[in-house]
Image (cartoon, rainbow, N blue to C red):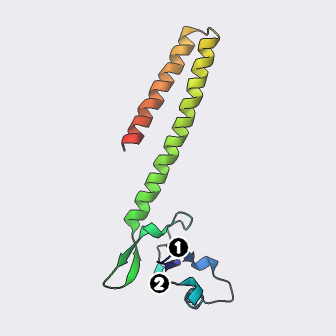
Amino acid sequence: MRVAINSRYKYLTFEHHCPDAEVFEVWVMQPQFETHSIVQVPEWVDADQLQFGHFDYEEVANKFEFNAGKYNSGIDMQQRQREIRELENLLAERYQAHGRLLATDADEDEIAEVKDEIALILQELGGLYNA
């Protein structure tokens, strides 16, 4: 996959956005695109996840290069944030369930089970927050 980089406005133009009748290198080098570099990115990279920050600028060569480490750490961070959101939603649900159980004079074993679930979720969240 090839990507054109506009360093002034920090955006990417992907080869698959190029009109069929155009040649990518010619199309992105039009003045209105203000393209700085065209970079070959490995095929395993998900274009939907790729961002300007995943590239390093090499001053001496005056070009951008893809940085797989930045890409992978960005993906890892997004995954961790997604897990945190899911656990926070589950925690809110369990707190609501706990409140309902207390309000309805539920069985102590049921209340204890929900408390244990809350403690487990909090422990998992603590690990993700500290990662």
Taking 37 as reference, is 103 left or right?
right
Taking 38 as reference, is 30 left or right?
right
Q: Can you identify the residue that label 2 sits on?
A: 36
Taking 32 as reference, is 59 left or right?
left
At 58% from the left and 79% from the top, the residue drawn is: 15
Crowding near the residue tagged with mark 1, few <14, some 14–19, many ≥20 C-alpha atoms within 10 Å: some
In this view, 10 is above or below 77: below
Identify the amino acid type marked 2: His
Q: Can you identify the residue that label 1 sits on?
A: 11
- Residue 13 point in image, percent of width and height: 56, 77
At 39% from the left and 63% from the top, the residue drawn is: 70
Identify the amino acid type marked 1: Tyr
- Residue 58 point in image, percent of width and height: 34, 79
Q: Which mark is residue 46?
A: none
Mark with earlier residue (1, 2): 1
In this view, 51 is above or below 61: above
The front one of 44 and 63 is: 63
